[in-house]
Amino acid sequence: MYRILITDGLDKAALAQLRELGFTVDEQFYPSEELGAALQNYDAVVVRSATKVRKEHIDLAKEGKLKLVIRGGVGVDNIDVAYAEEHGIRVKITPAASSNSVAELALAHMFSCARFISVAGHSMRQGKWEKKAFGAGIELCGKTLGVIGYGRIGRLLGQKAQALGMQVLAYDVYQDEQLVCDTMHYATLEELLQQSDFISLHTPSLDGKPLICQETIAQMKDGVVFINTSRGSNVDEAALLAALESGKVRAAGLDVFAEEPSHNAALLEHPRVSCTPHIAASTGEAQGRIGGEVVAILRETFGL
Ligand SMILES: NC(=O)c1ccc[n+]([C@@H]2O[C@H](COP(=O)([O-])OP(=O)(O)OC[C@H]3O[C@@H](n4cnc5c(N)ncnc54)[C@H](O)[C@@H]3O)[C@@H](O)[C@H]2O)c1
């Protein structure tokens, strides 16, 4: 029977379903130096973001029976995809399972930045009552949200923002004109940067210089709110911190960081940063949907 390794956890119902289907399922996280050899004994491995499947692991795994790597989630920056596929190991993702959870967290950070929710809670837990400091809130309604990367997550955030009375400007290398309406328009990156009150980043991890850097921040409106739930590599954190300190950026909501876990204390402790430790996809609903998609991929691959 087919053997499946789950390294970073999987929804309980999905685990039960796989076992009912007859798969032998092992749940075990391996340190990098042991992963390649371990993979030789499995037909498929299911990872989230913690396990990195690199060339050295694939070189060992391809000598065994590994045929498939499933990334529960979207970003595959923890897997050397092209190398795996060159060596006959397919890589699959669960594309839409967590999109709504991520869009909701981006929206939560927008509210948090508009009303200082995260930092005000922190201050109250220290026994303070800083009504004046946190009293200069703004509303989302009537503002313009710029969404960079209008794919699965960007569109869901755009829909929610429109329902809240926001205007949405989207910048994407691919445009779907059917989405355009009174409250949603495509724009160039320059137009989006110049016209948005809130900017939320939803592209994949982009190669080269971070998209959000000194030059792009300089083009933004004064007092813009910036949200990143995409990948930390898309943002120059030093440039963002400087912009928070100068007031160019009013507040930032961050779920992803250049280095994870992040040790950028100046950024994390900044009074106008709302931050979460890469949990945008971590909801019960998303885990359930990821589990369902993983089961479907395994059934299809192994004909069960
Ligand atoms: N924080 C989290 O836990 C979490 C969870 C899931 C996904 N993500 C991240 O969210 C991001 C978006 O995921 P998605 O499912 O919406 O992906 P998607 O592929 O559906 O959408 C990404 C969009 O970005 C566009 N794009 C690509 N390069 C671009 C560029 N240079 N400029 C402008 N647009 C560009 C694409 O055309 C696409 O429409 C990814 O970075 C993913 O890793 C984060």
Image (cartoon, helix red, strand yellow):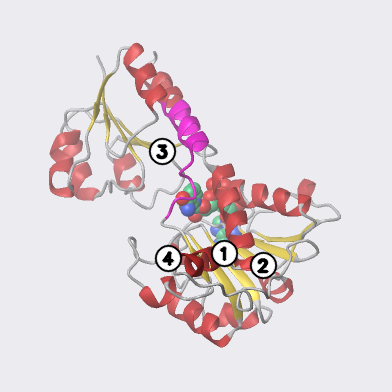
Residue 227: numbered disc:
1
Q: Is residue 230 left or right of residue 20?
A: right
Quadrant housing residue 282: top left
Mark 4: amino acid? Ser
Q: CA distance from mark 1 to mark 2?
A: 8 Å
Residue in the picture at 65% in, 67% down: 114
Crowd band around label 2 with a 10 angstrom C-alpha radius: few (<14), some (14–19), many (20+): many
Q: Which of the two discs, 1 and 3, labels the residue nearer the N terminus?
A: 3
Q: CA distance from mark 4 to mark 2?
A: 20 Å
Q: Secondary structure at mark 4?
A: helix
Magenta residues span 278-294
Q: Mark 4 near mark 1, Cβ–Cβ under 8 Å? A: no
For marks 4 and 1, give the one nearer the viewer: 1
| Most foreground residue, 271 or 38 | 271
Q: Which of the two discs, 4 and 2, labels the residue nearer the N terminus?
A: 2
Quarter holding the C terminus? top left
Q: Is residue 213 left or right of residue 259?
A: right
Q: x, y (%) of residue 166?
A: 77, 59
Mark 2: amino acid? Phe
Q: Secondary structure at mark 3?
A: loop
Residue in the picture at 35% in, 23% down: 15
Q: x, y (%) of residue 207?
A: 44, 64
- Up the image or down, 210 lies above or below 149; here it is below
Crowd band around label 4 with a 10 angstrom C-alpha radius: few (<14), some (14–19), many (20+): many
Mark 1: amino acid? Ile
* Residue pointed to by mark 4: 233
Residue in the picture at 58% in, 73% down: 251
* Residue pointed to by mark 3: 72
Q: Is residue 245 left or right of residue 70?
A: right
Q: Secondary structure at mark 1?
A: strand
